[in-house]
Image (cartoon, rainbow, N blue to C red):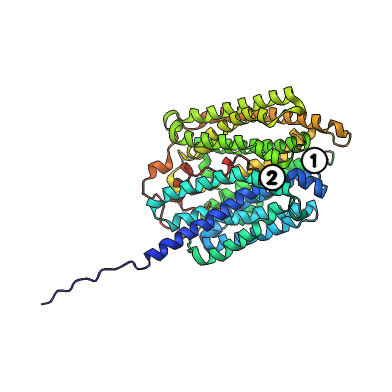
Amino acid sequence: MTSSTPTPTVPTTAPVADRRRWLALAIVMTAAFMDLVDVTIVNIAIPSIERDLSASFGAIQWITAGYALAFAAGLITGGRLGDIYGRKRLFLVGMAGFTLASALCGFAASPEMLVASRLLQGAMAAMMVPQVLAIVHVTFPPHERGKVFGMFGAVVGLGAVSGPLLGALLTQWNLFGLEWRPIFLINLPVGIAGLILGRKFITESRAEKALRLDLVGVALVTLALLMLIYPLTRGRELGWPLWGHLCMAGSLLVFAAFVAYERLKARKDGSPLVELSLFRVKSFAAGIAVQLTFGVVMGVFFLVWTLYMQIGLGWSPLKAGLTGVPFSLAVSVAAGVSVQKLVPRFGRKVLQAGALTMAAGVLFYIWEAGRYGTGIAPWQMAAPLIVMGLGMGLIVAPLTDAVLSDVPREHAGSASGLINTTGQMGTALGLGLVSVVFFGAIDEERLAPAEVGSAFAEAFQGALWWVVAVLAVIFAVMFALPGRPEQHLEGAGGASAEAPGEAVPSGLPAEAASEVPSRVPAKAADPALTR
């Protein structure tokens, strides 16, 4: 009788896999950085675009709002497409489309072409961005994800700070006489390199039992948003025609049709675009309302702030970009402290303190803008901007955890995708409202050149009062959030609550969606993010 000793299995491919996964991480993080920087770059270059293309105020709004709208409309579907057809494939398709759209933006010959290219860019970003964290999740083992998500958070912060500065420099330098166009063309070499390396080093993954697409739901919600936002951006220029009011009223009916269809879709095959049962959770419904209205605040503030500094005060792009640095740094500092130190001890009160602090900073800004007029200096803006940044940081970092706190774990992915989508919708709506709260106070046809500065300064102060009002609403709604939001990542350990093969519309496996928020702020956390 002989005994045999089993031959041990040697993981000969482990070292190769290790090298490949860190290269894959670098590629997807570069793509995320490219997306974030592109958004913040555009804000600082808006006045240059307006002068070069003779763009109307409505076109200016659509250059930013169009991106946010397309991104919001396609975000959940982009994640689901990755679940079905492969996250690597959708990431590469999105990156290729984003690179092509960037080229079209850079060579745009008219405002209409630029707006159309920005819509395409936003749609392609919606294919690319949801795959980033999903690829990270399936590429790295649980014990490495904390470090990886921390690195991703650093990339988000770096994109927020460097975007306006890079945009200011590229616009100021006027490379090859191209003025603002290099802010888009810089994406071409990055995108091409990402495509070549991504094909080689990113590993393909899919959901085992992916949900079906809900293209009707996407069409309905996109139509409703267009019917609401398009008349807002064009209405003032066209004299607020009757069709605009009818469109905005009709958007409510389309939203109602969307809700009815989603209920039918849920009963039919269990794969609606939006899981409506989530809104029965009080804290989630309140959190979505906060996310939406906070998006409105960001959409209004950052566009009118850019126009105020560069057109109203006549500052160069570089001077305006440098003025925003204290704000960005304050957001980053407060965000880190709020999640690590304050929220575990004080809970919901931290978010409410953030809303009050940000409102105080806005009121401080209104006072300074009124006192110093067009002679205001960047150093005088620093104090209110720091106060605003601290308030924003106290909100954006812990908000996702607060919204997800009472959501069942099996719906964490759906809820996470909806949070990000709602934030982008709010930003698009805020950008549309700029025509009412800012441009509505400026009569550019009767405005003498010498009156531009004072007119923009007054309109800026008026828009900030709207921001204060929305922040007051946000503060009140926050009472419906849980007193002590669950810290999803810290409490997740290594356990998975994911049902086998369950797909998540956001593009993240359910366990990933429940892990990510504590370390990676929502996209809306970007200080200068207005899509």
- The residue at the point 53 percent across, 40 percent down is 279
| Figure check: 387 above or below 180 | above
Question: Could one spot residue 227 in this view of the protein?
Answer: no
Q: Is residue 502 above or below residue 7?
A: above
Q: Which residue is mark 2?
A: 168
What amino acid type is highlighted by mark number 1? Gly
Across and down, in percent, residue 203 comes to: 48, 63
Q: Amino acid at mark 2?
A: Ala
Q: Looking at the image, is 447 positioned above or below residue 224?
A: above
- In which quadrant of the rendered view does residue 365 lie? top right
308 vs 230, nearest the viewer: 308
**Do we see residue 494 in this rendering?**
yes
- The residue identified by callout 1 is 235
Q: Are marks 2 and 1 in contact (CB under 8 Å)?
A: no
Looking at the image, the residue that sits furthest to the left is 1
As measured in the structure, the alpha-carbon distance from the residue carrying label 2 to the one carrying label 1 is: 31 Å
